[in-house]
Image (cartoon, rainbow, N blue to C red):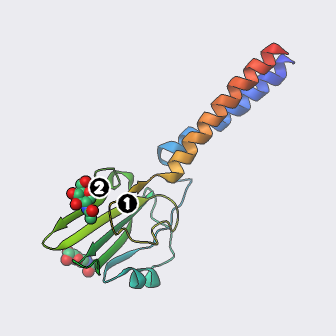
């Protein structure tokens, strides 16, 4: 296999890799997220009904959802907003109980991913789908590069 081809391949993969790692950091300028957004509404139907289809401001790369329920699991309050990454950590999601009220918080990072509201610990989670995808793309590229390098060397 000609060396020139190898170099070309290497250059291509390097470009792809640098794009991928740029993405996995904070791609506020490249990616525009849209979240269901509402403030202090009484339930999820009302929230989604009035949600405005507008992209999040630059830098807000997560959809944040807060759902407060009464003792019977009936909705009391729903808040949905675009937030930046710092407001969506493992510590900021989950459910807590006080005075007969359960409040659940979930976060996710794909457009319209916050349509449902969290009701329990199983759904009150942090879903980091987009960034995970970029990371796995990067590792796939690395693997291809390694396979390609070995293949080029052998032939
Ligand atoms: C929503 O409720 C909170 C807590 O009661 C209050 O501080 C806030 O001002 C309310 N926001 C709007 C836009 O109504
Ligand atoms: C969720 O998990 C926390 C801690 O693990 C627990 O204290 C809480 O009661 C759970 N909440 C619900 C609604 O299951």
- Residue 53's x, y, as percent? 51, 76
In front: mark 1 or mark 2? 1
* Furthest-top residue in this view: 154
Is residue 19 visible in the rendered structure shown here? Answer: no
| Mark 1 to mark 2 CA distance (whole Å) | 14 Å
Nearest the viewer among 27 and 62 is: 62
> Tag 1's secondary structure?
loop
**Residue sitting at 72 percent across and 29 percent down?**
11
User: Quadrant of the rendered structure where residue 76 is?
Assistant: bottom left
User: Quadrant of the rendered structure where residue 141 is?
Assistant: top right
- Residue 108's x, y, as percent? 44, 59
Q: Is residue 25 above or below residue 82?
A: above
Using a 10 Å C-alpha cutoff, classify the residue at mark 1 as few (fewer than 14 neighbours), some (14 to 19) or many (20 or more): few
Residue 87 numbered tag:
none
**Residue sitting at 51 percent across and 52 percent down?**
129
Q: Which quadrant contains ligand 1?
A: bottom left
* Furthest-left residue in this view: 99
> Tag 2's secondary structure?
loop
Callouts 1 and 2 close, C-beta under 8 Å: no
Nearest the viewer among 5 and 63 is: 63
Residue 92 numbered tag:
2
Residue 122 numbered tag:
1
């Amino acid at each position: 296999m000609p060396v020139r081809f190898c170099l070309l391949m290497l250059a291509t993969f390097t470009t792809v890799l640098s794009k991928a790692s740029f993405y996995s950091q904070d791609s506020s300028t490249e990616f525009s997220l849209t979240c269901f957004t509402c403030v202090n509404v009484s339930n999820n139907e009302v929230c989604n009904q009035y949600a405005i289809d507008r992209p999040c401001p630059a830098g807000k790369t997560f959809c944040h959802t807060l759902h407060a329920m009464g003792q019977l699991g009936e909705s009391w309050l729903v808040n949905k907003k675009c937030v930046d990454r710092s407001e969506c950590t493992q510590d900021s999601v989950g459910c807590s109980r006080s005075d007969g009220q359960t409040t659940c918080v979930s976060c996710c990072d794909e457009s319209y991913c916050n349509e449902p509201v969290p009701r329990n610990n199983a759904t009150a989670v942090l879903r980091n789908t987009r960034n995970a995808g970029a990371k796995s793309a990067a590792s796939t590229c690395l693997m291809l590069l390694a396979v390609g390098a070995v293949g080029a060397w052998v032939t």
